[in-house]
Amino acid sequence: MDVETALKFVERLLIKKLAKKLTDDEKAIIKGTWEDLKLDQIRGKYNLQNYADVRSTASKLWHNISQVVEPPTKVTKRGLKGIIEQQWLLQAEQSEKREIIVDDRPPDLKDSDFVGQTEYARAKLNTAPYQNLPPQHNAFIGREEQLCQLMRFLSADHPANILQVDGIAGVGKTALVLEAAYRCLDYRERVKSSRLLEQETNLKCDIPFFEVLIFVSAKNYHLLPNSSYVRRLIITRTLQDIYRTIARVLDDSTLSNIDSNNCRTDYFSEITNKISDALKTKNRVLMIVDNLETLEDRDKVLSFLFELPIKSIITTREQCGFKSIRLDSLSDQESNLLIEQQLREKAIDLTKEQKDELHQITGGIPMVIIWSIGRLAQGSSLQTIQDDLRNPEGDIAEFSFKTSLRDIKNTLAYKLLITLSVFKQAPNWESVVAVAGLETEPEGRIRREMETLQRLSLVRYHNGRYKMLPLTREYALAELQKYKEFKSQVLERWVQWYIDFAKREHNRPRLERFTIGYKNIEEEWENLVSVLHFCKDENHYEYLKELWSYLNNYTNLRGYWKDRLSWLNHLTDVAITKGDFGTAVSTMSRQARILLLMGQPEQLQRAKELLLKAWSWCGYANFSEVDYVLNHLAGLFLRLGEYDSSHKWLNKEQDNLNSQHDLSDQHRLRYQIYIDRERSEVLFYQKEYALSKELCNSVIEKSSQVNPEYGLRNSNYAKKILADIAIEENDIDMAEDLLKEVYAEVEHHKDKRRIAYCLVSQAKLEQIKGNLGQAKSYLSQASNHFKDLGMTRDLEKIKILQLSF
């Protein structure tokens, strides 16, 4: 059994029993287990997170697999392969059971025969008795996880009798429940004709049996691609309409004359009992109530469904509190598959770039994709379609947004909605309240209004954040434009909120900043970048400069170097234009740092130009900025191999430090550490190992005397150099101990550059020990990090090192 087959098989079991798919990390763990790799080796080969996270993920994976095998068996890493192969053989022997096979069709759905047979089979099912399902006009794509979840809820074993599928208009609620209903109908017909083995489906979960399937819809219109609406011929508005539909599907004339408007107090109970008795004569009944929110007597309908001995599914834009499946936009893969399907159906050819643009503007909403491609078939351009989609007065906005908006106009919920639209990334509670200017409002009131937005499917609360679909955000932004004064206030509060947020995280104690602070910044990164762009576009230089000052170190540590270069270049240009040469010194020297680390000859030359220009303007800068320029001039010449020049600039840095008479002892010691640390590295490259070791030990000693927040990082810089010296001197035990200590710190801080350097040193160490496989694995990981950072000079060094293996 090969590993790809095993992955499909395991995922099929997990979806069927737990409605879960394998994550990328879980797939990597199974692949590595199949190759008999240890967890630490798996982590290295597949570039996973730290060992503790991998071990935790593996433990949860073994537990989940233990639950889905038959009979339930404790699964461990050692026993996984044998258990999966045994389960595979067992199911192969029991193929006559209604276990549905893994779909091996290619993901591009090019199997036109399969689609054609499905459409033909569905058309035949429309004539089957005891059902009134409407025809499906498009083959169903995606949503497999939600479809399996719905099937589990529909099973006789699940206690919920009323289920709810909710989401905004056009997201595919009706399509999902109809696909589930047709699968159940198809299974019913195959059971009746004993054709279970002749026609198997590609769904990876059990399908429940229903003898009767009843569909009622309260939708008023169909939206067509020619920008028009077609009124539905059959509309369910009242409970009376539902009574008639049940009577028609059951072919029961005794139910036809029921009057839901009868005022007799016991009449509702009487007719409900009568319908219940009729339904009990059937072997399980499924009723679908589509578009619940547009029913005239919704509460009566819900009371009626509560009393029936059947399974019911309601689709709605509003959350009603039942067992729920909430639909968001399609995944990128599913969206692209639907686009391909619709283009084939309409015989339209688009380039890959045009398909990508279509995917982008439709936002993964099925109705919008189908509508847009219908417009293409009529000759509309992509630009025209995009303009129409963004038009807040257009058909899509009317169909999917305006109806819900009418319910909340002139309320606090409306104010919250248009405030939410300024956030590019889903915000948390605290930021929404602050940007909306509602800090003085009672929290309970705000939460109730936010729940209204969630109930209307305009906003979704997920993992502590309030999420909007892209098109909903577009329309909400258009609403915000109508209120210029409020918009100006919101944007002002939005910018100030993120400046205050970044400042708070940056000003944490250093060790806390590297852990908690940078984690918080990472979670808000898209919003922070959005604020940066706004400040740039609106020429808010002071805001931009302040916000960037709090984000600069984070972007360096996390390796966002290309973005960092772009922002620093912009700030430099504006600073020079405004005569703010002190800021220019700072931004130019930070640009130079990135360029010298990237290391290409032209980048080193540009770094040299920037640093020398910054040095010429040092009269405008404070001592700290001057020290930074001098230290990086020394680093530049180290990378150029001009070691004497490097020492010369370090001497200038030392003279500059000695001339400062108002520094505290702690500050003076910290700057001395930076000088000694840089000089010890120059000496290492000069192969002056004894002098380098002496300075490294001095750095470690001095680091113990300063604040631990600064001391630990600098001490580990020195220990990394000592480890490299130990490798050169073949002192394996010393090198191993030092690298272990350094790697723990850099991985904890997620410092990609220093992680990569540690991996290179570990590779050299493994080479000495004769573990070439492990050495190559470390080099591969380091190479990926250097590639992500654009550090081409170090990539070239790795290639040379690999040749030596």
Image (cartoon, helix red, strand yellow):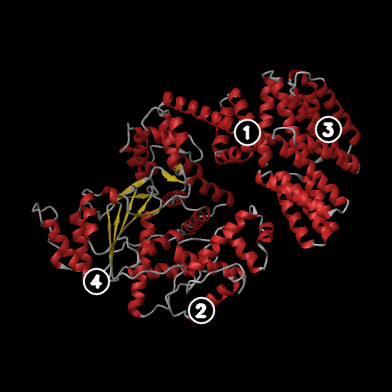
- For the question of whether residue 58 can be seen, the reply is yes
Q: Which mark is first along the chain, 2 or 3?
A: 2
Q: Which mark is first along the chain, 4 or 3?
A: 4
The mark found on residue 253 in the picture is none
The mark found on residue 90 in the picture is 2
Disc 3 or disc 4, which is closer to the eye?
Answer: 3
The residue furthest left is 264
In this image, 311 relative to 531: left or right? left
Name the residue beneath numbered marker 4: 282
Q: Amino acid at mark 1?
A: Pro
Quarter-of-image position of residue 452: top left
CB atoms of marks 4 and 1 within 8 Å: no
The mark found on residue 634 in the picture is 3
Residue for point 48% across, 74% down: 70
Q: Is residue 523 above or below residue 581?
A: below
Label 1: which secondary element: loop
Residue 170 is situated, as x and y percent measured from the top left of the image, at 39, 50
CB atoms of marks 3 and 4 within 8 Å: no
Disc 2 or disc 4, which is closer to the eye?
Answer: 2
The CA span between labels 4 and 1 is 69 Å
Q: Which mark is first along the chain, 2 or 1?
A: 2
Name the residue beneath numbered marker 1: 509
Label 3: which secondary element: helix
How many C-alpha atoms fall within 10 Å of the one at disc 2: few (<14), some, or many (≥20)? few
Disc 1 or disc 2, which is closer to the eye?
Answer: 1
> Is 724 in front, or is 386?
724
Q: Which mark is first along the chain, 1 or 3?
A: 1
> Is 322 in front, or is 424?
322
Q: Amino acid at mark 4?
A: Lys
> Is 457 in front, or is 126?
457
The CA span between labels 3 and 1 is 29 Å
Q: Which mark is first along the chain, 4 or 2?
A: 2
